[in-house]
Amino acid sequence: MSTAKPSLELLRTMTDEHVLRAIMAGGRMTRTEIAARTGISKPTISDSVRRLAAAGLLADTGERTTGRGRAGSYYSLVPDAGAALVAEIGPNGVLAEAVDAFGGIAASARAELGRAPGAEQAAAALRRVAEQLSGSARLRCAVVSAADPVDRASGALVRLPDEPFLVGDLDPVAVLRSCVSGEVLVDNDVNWASCAERDRGAAREVDDFAYLHLGEGLGAAVVTDGEVRRGHRGLVGEIAHLITTGPSGTAIPFIEFFGETGLRQPGTTAIDVAALRERYRPGPDQVLDDLARAVGGVVSAMVALVDPQLVVLGGSWGRDAEVLDALRRHPAPRTAEFAVAEVESPELTGARARAVERLRELIIRAA
């Protein structure tokens, strides 16, 4: 039985991908360095570099190696290889970055937003920062992190009861269509945060974990077999109305715990983090122990449904040592090992990593 050999075209395509990935990881490289990194012969690498340069993807930087022997030329991506737009929409406004294929931030922009600004104002802010960045780089794709629930199919934001930061029926895909030439990927900020913790944080080498965001808003992400699970509409992890134990010992929705304990910001369901921390101090105020039981009830439900190895505690007050200590003092009937989130700005970090990955895929596809 004969075994079919790969065609010359396929071999060239595979080599070109190896060369591009090596350069995108290294920034600039000589053909000798690429050969050493990839394990492919230098003549084969030289042929690939010539093809990619002729295709307008690689360019000689003009820099040369120094020292003994024949000087080598450094190659890198052409300057107009493009960038990916990364945008974070949240209570602190819209923060946007243009990131290149090396993972560097080429430019950034910010627009302020108030709480619950509405779709029109949020769309204007997102469009403004995208247009500003499109003037400095060719935006080939975009990844958006939103503090609101996100519809999986359309990428539009979803209204749910008691969400503290609502921008209405914002459709980031439609807003960015005129500024970005390719795909616009939108997901909830907690999902992006879980990706950051999976790749470089507390959940490294853990395939099954839950990420619990405890901040001004409440949310969760579920990762099984190393993948974020989003559900039919993309609304996995919306835990605000999950039934847990209230301060009086009765069953209440999780979000109502903060209303009953006076820990909401005025005129909104957003949690008053400063007021919560003020009540961490020991004494007759039992809010921290009550809080541990309420959070423990949420954790028990997640353990029952998805059986995580680890629960990562993130968000502004979820990472507080007092909260972790209280959870360990009052273990739920069914619980899991806890870890505190490690990555700073995990929502933006997770979205940025996906944007760089997608941009690299587009560059490789162009080869």
Image (cartoon, rainbow, N blue to C red):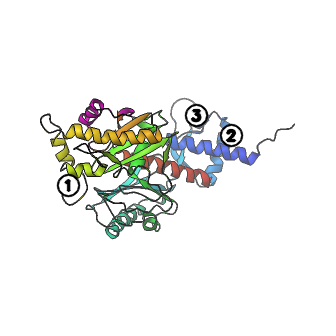
Residue located 56% across and 40% down the image: 22
Which of the 4 image quadrants contains residue 293?
A: top left
Q: Position of residue 168 (x, y in %)?
A: 35, 66
Residue 334 circle label: none
Q: Mark 3 belongs to which amino acid?
A: Arg
| Secondary structure state at the residue bearing disc 1 | loop
Sort mark 2 into few (<14), some (14-19) or many (20+) by Cα contacts within 10 Å. Answer: some
Of helix, strand and loop, which one carries label 3?
A: helix
Q: Secondary structure at mark 2?
A: helix
Q: Residue at x 42, y 38 (%)?
A: 303
What whole-number distance in Å separates the C-alpha atoms at marks 2 and 3? 13 Å
Q: Position of residue 266 (x, y in %)?
A: 18, 58
Tell me what residue is drawn at x 68 percent, y 38 percent: 43
Relative to residue 236, is residue 19 drawn left or right?
A: right
| Residue 265 badge | 1
Residue range of the region highlighted in magenta in the rendering: 317-338
| Position above or below: 182 against 61 | below
Q: Which residue was labeled with disc 3?
A: 37
Residue 156 vs 45, above or below: the answer is: below
Q: Which quarter of the image is occupied by the N terminus?
A: top right
Instruction: Return the mark for residue 44.
Output: 2
Q: Nearest the camera: 357 or 332?
A: 332
- In the rendered structure, the answer to whether residue 310 lies left or right of residue 295 reads right
Q: Nearer the viewer, mark 1 or mark 3?
A: 1
